[in-house]
Amino acid sequence: MTVRSARRLTVAWIVAATVLLTWPGIVPFNRIEPRIFGLPFVMIWVASWVVIGFVVLAIVDRAVTRAERAAGRED
């Protein structure tokens, strides 16, 4: 993955998270049932976006690191 496409993925994740974690995007998911691992559904919804964010940022870090190594700039 190139740095440019990784940055586009990051922007897409930020936009999606902003829309789906604020009102009115979270309204369809704001319910207690079903419970998953004993937690209300809305908590799992928010926690899953945190995990997705970690994955997206790990992908971006990997792409930037590879680009820097290819350019010969190692720290």
Image: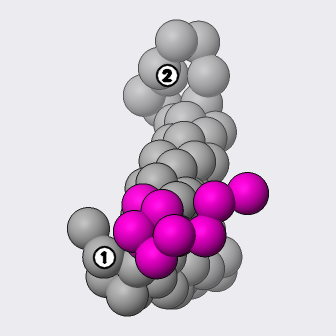
Q: What residue sits 59% from the left and 12% below the top? A: 38
Q: What residue sits 26% from the left and 68% below the top? A: 1
Label whose residue precedes the other's in the sequence (2 or 1): 1
> Is 55 in front, or is 59?
59
Where is residue 3, by image quadrant?
Answer: bottom left
Residue 45, position as x, y percentages in the image: 52, 46
Residue 5, position as x, y percentages in the image: 31, 82
Helix, strand or loop at label 1? It is loop
- Check the image and name the residue furthest to the left: 1
Above or below, 43 against 61 in this view is above
Above or below, 15 against 75 in this view is below
> Is 36 in front, or is 68?
68
Q: What residue sits 37% from the left and 87% below the top? A: 4
Quadrant including the C terminus: bottom right
Helix, strand or loop at label 2? It is loop
Residue identifier under label 2: 35
State whether the magenta stretch is mostly helix, strand or loop.
helix
Residue identifier under label 1: 2
The answer to whether residue 45 is magenta is no
The magenta-colored residue range is: 66-75
Give the residue type that dot 2 points to.
Arg
- Check the image and name the residue furthest to the right: 75
The reply to whether the C-beta atoms of the residues labelled 2 and 1 are less than 8 Å apart is no
The answer to whether residue 72 is magenta is yes
Above or below, 24 against 47 in this view is below
Give the residue type that dot 1 points to.
Thr
Instruction: Report crowding for label 2: few under 14, some 14 to 19, many 20 or more residues within 10 A (C-alpha).
Output: few
